Image: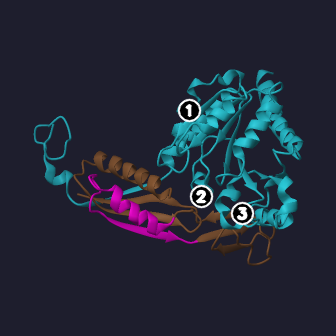
């Protein structure tokens, strides 16, 4: 091993004067290149099993876990779910999901503020992807960082609850721009709040004109059918791909 | 906050390239950050100072080129400058803009010894 720079093995005539001359090199690499590569390999793996993969993003406390609990319970006879739970600490959410009977794995990011494609790739190792229809990935509660990290999902689903204020899409445009679907949760509380539902939808469409919006309450059950219909449609599209491939 | 993990990625990429060139040190790093990338350049500078310690890039200068954003209107076809994702077309006011430029977050160039 060369003691100067660690290059090995030392060659006869090994000369550092050329190697170490000060010089510029062109790199031109995206900082997320590695994550994008891993996300792509997750995507290939998910596609092999015709999985519908959703990345649920929101601020903490919007009701992501509660929406999942109700969804998994209501649809347990018709769809097979696997769930990845991302949080900085604790397995509390995974425990709640496990109580519904669905396979779940908790990922603790420690100091990390988001899930990345590497964590998800390892996170799904224990799941039986062959029998899974939908993989739900509940990201760390944070409306900023998870927007930048592709996990290999089909859709980001942004959850916004009516207790948060209608201008969240304007304050965190990156996230609402990256999402295909926005769930407005806790609408059973609307009579008690000064939350302008129409204004909220206008703001979201200003950031993302294509975004689909479903208003619901996982507490009262209002609007849940539309969400289930959206899930069913997504799964059927995947199954369509499967059938087309067989033919 | 995610500037920290982006900076760690950046240093990893920089070291990989520098090692391939048998470099003993990275003396300067040049990056491009787009106005719509969601990255705060100042946070990146702060993270770089902390994260580069003990790496080949220890003590390197960091140059950040800020890239302004450009959108293309889906309705009228005009190109317009954008300052945020909330901007509408400067010609017709439509909000559906395809982003042509401004989402960059890339390591562009290194100076090595």
Q: Where is residue B103 in the image (x, y as percent from the top left)?
A: 58, 62
How far is the residue under mark 3 from the one under mark 1? Answer: 30 Å
Q: Mark 2 points at which residue?
A: A144
Circle 3 crowding by C-alpha within 10 Å: few under 14, some 14–19, many from 20: many
Q: In this view, does A7 lie above or below B54?
A: above
Q: Which chain's residue wears label 2?
A: A
Could you tell me which residue is drawn at 50 percent across and 43 percent down? A109
Residue stretch rendered in magenta on the structure? B40-68
Residue A236 placement: quadrant: top right
Along the polypeptide, which appears first: circle 2 or circle 1?
1
Circle 2 crowding by C-alpha within 10 Å: few under 14, some 14–19, many from 20: many
In the current view of this chain or complex, which residue is farthest to the bottom? B91
Q: Which chain's residue wears label 3?
A: A
Residue B65 painted magenta:
yes
Q: Do the residues labelled 2 and 1 touch (CB within 8 Å)?
A: no
Name the disc covering residue A96, or none: none
How far is the residue under mark 2 from the one under mark 1? Answer: 22 Å
Residue A241 can be seen in this image:
yes
Q: Is mark 1 on a helix, strand or loop?
A: helix
Q: Name the residue under label 1.
A: A123
Name the disc covering residue A169, or none: 3
Along the polypeptide, which appears first: circle 3 or circle 1?
1
| Residue A1 left/right relative to A114 | left
Q: Chain A is drawn in which colour?
A: cyan
What quarter of the picture does the C terminus of chain A occupy?
A: top right
């Amino acid at each position: 091993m060369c003691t100067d720079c660690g290059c090995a093995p030392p060659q006869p005539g090994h000369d550092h004067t050329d190697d170490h001359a000060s010089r510029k090199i062109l790199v031109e690499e995206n900082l997320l290149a590695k994550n994008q590569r891993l996300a792509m390999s997750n995507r290939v793996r998910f596609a092999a099993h015709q999985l519908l993969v959703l990345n649920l993003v929101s601020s903490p406390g919007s009701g992501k876990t509660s929406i999942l609990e109700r969804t998994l319970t209501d649809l347990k006879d018709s769809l097979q779910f696997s769930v990845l739970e991302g949080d900085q600490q604790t397995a509390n959410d995974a425990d709640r999901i496990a109580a519904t009977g669905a396979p779940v794995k908790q990922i603790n990011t420690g100091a990390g503020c988001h899930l990345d494609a590497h964590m998800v790739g390892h996170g799904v190792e224990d799941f039986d992807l062959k029998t899974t229809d939908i993989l739900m990935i509940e990201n760390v509660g944070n409306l900023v960082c998870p927007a930048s990290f592709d996990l290999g999902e089909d859709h980001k689903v942004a959850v916004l609850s009516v207790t948060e204020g209608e201008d969240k899409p304007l304050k965190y445009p990156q996230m609402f721009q990256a999402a295909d679907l926005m769930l407005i949760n806790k609408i059973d509380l609307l009579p008690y709040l000064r939350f302008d539902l129409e204004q909220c939808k206008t703001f979201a469409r200003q950031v993302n004109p294509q975004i689909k919006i479903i208003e619901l309450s996982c507490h009262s059950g209002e609007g849940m059918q539309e969400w289930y219909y959206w899930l069913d449609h997504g799964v059927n599209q995947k199954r369509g791909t499967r059938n087309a491939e067989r033919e | 906050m995610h500037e920290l993990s982006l900076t760690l990625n950046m240093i990893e990429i920089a070291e990989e390239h520098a090692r391939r060139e048998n470099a003993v040190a990275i003396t300067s790093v040049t990056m491009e950050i787009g106005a719509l990338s969601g990255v705060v350049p100042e946070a990146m500078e702060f993270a770089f100072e902390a994260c580069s310690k003990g790496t080949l890039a220890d003590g390197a200068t960091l140059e950040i080129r800020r890239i302004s954003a450009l959108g293309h209107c889906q309705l009228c076809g005009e190109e317009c400058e954008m300052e945020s994702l909330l901007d509408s077309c400067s010609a017709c006011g439509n909000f559906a803009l395809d982003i042509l430029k401004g989402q960059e977050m890339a390591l562009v160039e290194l100076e090595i010894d």
